[in-house]
Image (cartoon, rainbow, N blue to C red):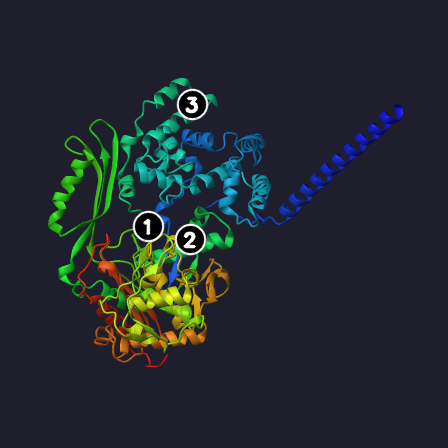
């Protein structure tokens, strides 16, 4: 019996020793990991937060000429902490870091609370950052995964508080915190919302702004004032408990009506017209590409990337050729290049204000197509009646934007580099980050997809040659869901047989469908389309209609240009680029799209297949049976041209995508809603040819 007990005791000791040893090893591992992570933390001894470090980011064209800049200067004004009312500072501390003046950079109690909350909720949210830690995020570039960044952030927060006073850290924070709508800093927010300096804010006004830093949309002063006010009341309660306010001062504050004092700055905000300059469609696309690339390369948030673009003094070498851009804009904006018979207008109308009963309204309707300007008064009257806005209601802002129809887009790229040389995003007055028809409009590509979905894969896989002969006889294909699908030719003719070259030149739907179904297969076709760079395709698009561009959503003119540029570039795909390099203010390269992962270069077709396609696409323009060549060659006579027209069902979309030995270019036009256009309209071919003719002035005529 004694021996048995002794054995059990020894066994327990062994197990306890193993467990303790294991825990010790884990603890040592954690300590080593933390120590190693901390050793990689950047040196903050030279980080200066005593004054805001901000500079406009400059954009240059291909000749090194400044064309624009990204600036947050109008939305970011610096104010010393001594100028900000104490009550406003206390409101911010109450919301963001209630023990700011007690901890030494990190709040252990807050961290433990976040750990418990995360464990009980089963999620991994932050929730424990102090104001000092948030300053670290803004002022210091951390590297590593999210856990390593958090460890470095907490370590550096402690070091930071050894370098700077609490007031200095808080001053930087108040001048760098975001208040929604690209507004940075409490001084800018006070001006934007209340039309006054932050030094003049009341306690409640300051609180209404401070809560924006948590959830700017949910607590929006205008669109969700009720949410904002509920949060403000909670803050005032907490301030009373913390001893910042007496009960009487709190009750007095609750009598204020801050939302009735919103100034003209907010009206501009509601109208969607931030103070940043309204920039070109090219610059809009450039901004989005840099924003995405910064997040990808440096593993940072969208907010952090945005701050870099607007305030870090970047030097952006864009791909824009200002000469080419000016030519594109000259022709595309000229009303005489669009048939009068097609003219309509698209209307976007928004209105905001206060109802007679004190409630606020914010209404908007967009993409309404009217026949003429004369229809606008009746349209507005009908909308106001629908929204129940009338006499006794106060209108704070009213905005009416009209855009001519049909809309259009144009893209020019250097297919040897992927560089976007010019981009036209839409007709009419450009407004702040307006819809870009060149990069955002997903439209039906029509017959341009025959080449990409059927003929290119079949050639590359060795299934056909340019001289392969296929019958034009009408055919029906059985589909998996039951029933059948019968492709129809645009001209209603189904006699004879055609070579692939002739089928492309004559845009024969039946032959394209036969090649896709019988030679390529839907899955293989879909794979090739993905390789060509299309990002808007869906699984539902895997149908026989791929051969004729029948899609669920559609594709953008930019991606269509890149796909045909792949053929022009001997089968090598290059992702469209709006810049070559982005440098920091010291000239160090931050982003490089001329090589590596960002360039996104890969072989889609063999050089032989790409060359055969180019030869066949030349027949579309200059072949004996070409229907396109006459319109093109009227204005652009000598330079070799390869390309393909595209017309969606009911003429809702008209396209031509083509290339020369120098450039690839796509034109798209159509109604925004989309409506059908008369079949006889080919004005887009005239436009493409006029633009490309002038772009090529002075260029040597050479063969592909």
Residue reaching furthest top? 248
- Judge the density around disc 3: few (<14), some (14-19), many (≥20) Cα neighbours within 10 Å: some
Secondary structure of residue under mark 3: helix
530 horizontally vs 650: left or right: right
In the picture of the structure, the residue carrying the numbered disc 1 is: 276
Residue 437 in the image: x percent, y percent? Answer: 29, 57
Secondary structure of residue under mark 1: loop
Inter-mark Cα distance, 3 to 2: 39 Å
Whichever of labels 3 and 1 marks the residue nearer the N terminus, that label is 3
Which mark identifies residue 237?
3
**Quarter-wise, where is residue 559 in the image?**
bottom left
In the picture of the structure, the residue carrying the numbered disc 2 is: 309
Q: Look at the picture and state if 702 lies above or below 25.
A: below
- Judge the density around disc 2: few (<14), some (14-19), many (≥20) Cα neighbours within 10 Å: many
Residue 394 in the image: x percent, y percent? Answer: 19, 33
**Quarter-wise, where is residue 246 in the image?**
top left
Residue 618 in the image: x percent, y percent? Answer: 32, 76
571 horizontally vs 494: left or right: right
Secondary structure of residue under mark 2: helix
Is residue 528 or residue 31 the one in the foreground? Answer: 528
Is residue 95 or residue 693 the one in the foreground? Answer: 693
- Residue 415 at least partly seen: no
Q: Image quadrant for the N terminus?
A: top right
Is residue 572 or residue 216 the one in the foreground? Answer: 572
Residue 92 in the image: x percent, y percent? Answer: 44, 32
Inter-mark Cα distance, 3 to 1: 37 Å
Whichever of labels 3 and 2 marks the residue nearer the N terminus, that label is 3
Q: Image quadrant for the C terminus?
A: bottom left
Is residue 387 or residue 272 the one in the foreground? Answer: 387
Whichever of labels 2 and 1 marks the residue nearer the N terminus, that label is 1
Residue reaching furthest left? 374
């Amino acid at each position: 019996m004694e021996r048995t007990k002794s054995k059990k005791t020894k066994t327990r000791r062994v197990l306890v020793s193993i467990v303790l040893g294991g825990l010790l090893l884990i603890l040592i591992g954690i300590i080593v990991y933390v120590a190693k992570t901390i050793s990689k933390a950047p040196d903050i001894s030279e980080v200066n937060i005593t004054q805001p470090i901000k500079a406009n980011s400059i954009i240059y064209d291909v000749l090194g000429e400044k064309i624009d800049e990204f600036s947050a200067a109008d939305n970011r004004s610096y104010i010393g902490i001594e100028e900000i009312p104490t009550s406003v500072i206390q409101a911010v501390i109450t919301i963001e870091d209630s023990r700011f003046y007690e901890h030494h950079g990190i709040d252990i109690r807050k961290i433990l609370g976040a750990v418990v909350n995360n464990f009980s909720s089963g999620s991994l949210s932050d929730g424990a950052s102090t104001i000092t830690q948030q300053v670290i995020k803004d002022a210091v570039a951390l590297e590593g995964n999210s856990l390593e960044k958090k460890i470095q952030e907490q370590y550096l927060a402690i070091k930071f508080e050894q370098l700077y006073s609490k007031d200095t850290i808080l001053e930087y924070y108040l001048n760098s915190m975001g208040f929604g709508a690209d507004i940075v800093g409490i001084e800018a927010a006070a001006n934007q919302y209340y039309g006054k300096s932050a030094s003049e804010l009341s306690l409640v006004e300051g609180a209404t702004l401070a809560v924006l830093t948590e959830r700017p949309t949910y607590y929006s002063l205008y669109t969700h004032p009720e949410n904002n006010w509920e949060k403000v009341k909670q803050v005032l309660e907490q301030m009373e408990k913390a001893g910042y306010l007496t009960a009487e001062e709190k009750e007095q504050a609750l009598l204020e009506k801050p939302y009735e004092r919103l100034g003209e700055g907010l009206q501009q905000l509601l109208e969607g017209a931030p103070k940043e300059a309204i920039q070109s469609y090219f610059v809009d696309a450039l901004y989005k590409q840099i924003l995405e690339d910064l997040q990808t390369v440096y593993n940072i948030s969208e907010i952090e990337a945005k701050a870099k673009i607007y305030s870090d003094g970047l030097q952006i070498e864009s791909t824009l050729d200002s000469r080419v851009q000016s030519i594109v804009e000259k022709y595309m904006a000229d009303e005489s290049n669009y048939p009068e018979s097609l003219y309509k207008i698209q209307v976007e109308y928004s209105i905001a204000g206060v109802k007679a009963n004190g409630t606020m309204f914010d209404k908007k309707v967009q993409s309404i197509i009217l026949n003429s300007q004369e229809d606008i008064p009746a349209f507005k009257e009908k909308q106001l009646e629908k929204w129940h806005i009338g006499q006794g209601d106060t209108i704070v802002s009213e905005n009416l934007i009209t855009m001519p129809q049909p809309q259009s887009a144009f893209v020019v790229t250097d297919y040897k580099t992927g560089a976007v040389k010019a981009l036209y995003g839409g007709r009419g007055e450009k407004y702040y980050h307006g819809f870009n028809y060149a990069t955002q409009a997903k439209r039906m590509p029509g017959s341009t997809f025959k080449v990409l979905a059927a003929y290119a894969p079949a050639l590359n896989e060795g299934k056909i040659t340019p001289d392969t002969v296929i019958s034009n006889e009408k055919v029906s294909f059985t589909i998996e869901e039951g029933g059948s699908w019968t492709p129809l030719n645009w001209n209603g003719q189904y006699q004879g047989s055609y070579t692939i070259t002739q089928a492309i030149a004559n845009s024969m739907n039946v032959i394209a469908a036969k090649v896709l179904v019988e030679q390529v297969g839907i899955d293989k076709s879909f794979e090739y389309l993905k390789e060509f760079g299309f990002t808007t395709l869906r699984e539902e698009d895997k149908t026989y209609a791929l051969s004729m561009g029948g899609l669920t959503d559609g594709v953008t003119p930019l991606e269509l240009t890149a796909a045909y540029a792949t053929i022009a570039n001997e089968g090598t795909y290059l992702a469209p680029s709006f810049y070559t390099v982005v440098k920091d203010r010291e000239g160090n390269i931050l982003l490089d799209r001329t090589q590596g992962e960002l360039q996104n270069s890969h072989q889609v077709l063999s050089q032989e297949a790409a060359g055969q396609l180019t030869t066949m696409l030349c027949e579309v323009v200059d072949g004996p049976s070409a229907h396109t060549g006459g319109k093109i060659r009227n204005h652009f006579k000598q330079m070799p041209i390869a390309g393909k027209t595209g017309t969606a069902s009911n003429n809702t979309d008209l396209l031509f995508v083509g290339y020369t030995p120098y450039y690839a270019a796509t034109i798209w036009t159509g109604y925004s809603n989309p409506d059908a256009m008369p079949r006889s309209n080919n004005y887009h071919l005239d436009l493409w040819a006029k633009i490309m003719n002038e772009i090529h002035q002075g260029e040597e005529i050479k063969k592909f």
